[in-house]
Amino acid sequence: MSTMNAVVVHTPGKPNVLKVIQRPIPQPTPGQVRIKVKAFGLNRSEMFTRQGHSPVSLVQFPRILGIEAVGVIDAAPGLEHQFPLGSTAATAMGGMGRVFDGGYAEYTCVPAKQVQIVKTKLPWDVLGALPEMLQTAWGSVMKSLSLKPGDRLLIRGGTTSVGLAVAAIAKMHGAYVASTTRKKEREALLREHGADEVWVDDGAIARQIGEKSGEYFDKVLELVGTVTLADSLRCAKKGGTVSMTGIVGNEWHLERVNPMELIPSETKLTVYGGSDEDFISTPLNELVKMVDEGKLKVRVGRVFKMEEIVEAHQCMEANEAAGKIVVLP
């Protein structure tokens, strides 16, 4: 077999620009490995790339999207001792789906420096949900926010796949966790994943906290994005830290920003973007083992087939999954 199915975007646009077509199976160049893809998760950054919001200097169309994938090592020229053929592998970030073709395909070639061999028997639909989600969750709380036992953490956008994973990881590390949701009926879901308290988000959580308890937070993880950032900054106590990781609110930029007005005195603002170096430094096998043992709860929202990729992106765009969306080629 010399060809494969792949999801290709020729020009930016709505979900219907995602086309499943035949493509030649890629051949690994020196320093690359080829993965036979068994599953890939969907990420909002892929939606923005599909819509044409990624810089043209970064993304050239046509492009196979996908910033992550899991599968088995299919070829690793000169690197078989590190990446034995048939081994279960995960990859994420490092330009996948933007600089070079990504994981929305039956095969993908990626730099070996951004591949981890994973020892697990988790089903593919569960494993496919984990690489980018766990990297982002771990990196956000342990690197960007430097979470410590006893910290009070607020997760803004708690029902996202990353938000649910962050809650579980933070609880494991002894933090007090509060999560937000726009839908009160999702409170049980948040508590199931570790939230000690839940706030129904009306856009003014800082006001709600002030009126109810006045107990603000040591650390705040902003997953909604710029649309709630100003309010999230006011949810941190003096000396607290806010990290912006997500853009669920679909707004990239702050218009007419005055930092002196935006950032309260003694509050620190940082971000977490992630990279291939961050992926390799994420203790993926340790976290996957915890998932396998039921010690770390993660939620797969919906599972689609590759030929359902348009519907999958529609589901992601509408925020309907209540967990990670996974696609099986």
Image (spheres, rainbow, N blue to C red):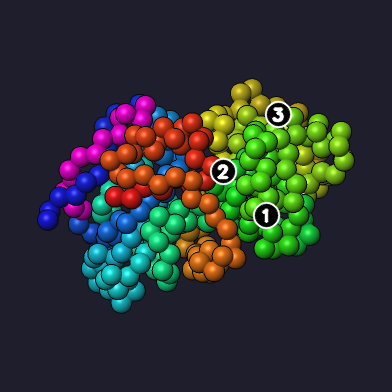
Q: Quadrant of the N terminus?
A: bottom left
313 lies left or right of 203:
left
Residue 169: x percent and y percent?
63, 59
Q: Can I make out residue 111 in this image?
A: no
Q: Which mark is residue 202?
A: 3
Q: Residue furthest top?
A: 256
Q: Give above or below for 226 relative to 148.
A: above
Question: Mark 2 or mark 3, which has the lower sequence index?
Answer: 2
Query: Which of pointers 1 and 2 indicates the residue nearer the eye?
Result: 1
Residue stretch in magenta: 14-26
Along the viewing direction, whichever of 272 and 286 lies nearer the viewer? 286
The amino acid beneath tag 1 is Gly
Residue 125: x percent and y percent?
40, 55
Residue 54: x percent and y percent?
42, 34
Judging from the image, what secondary structure is the residue with disc 3 in? loop
- Which residue is located at x 54 percent, y 55 percent? 298
Magenta stretch holds residue 79: no
- Which residue is located at x 28 percent, y 70 percent? 86
Q: Which mark is residue 160?
A: 2
- Which residue is located at x 35 percent, y 67 percent? 88
Q: Which mark is residue 194?
A: 1
Where, by quadrant of the figure, is residue 185 drawn? top right
Mark 1 crowdedness (10 Å alpha carbons): few <14, some 14-19, many ≥20: many
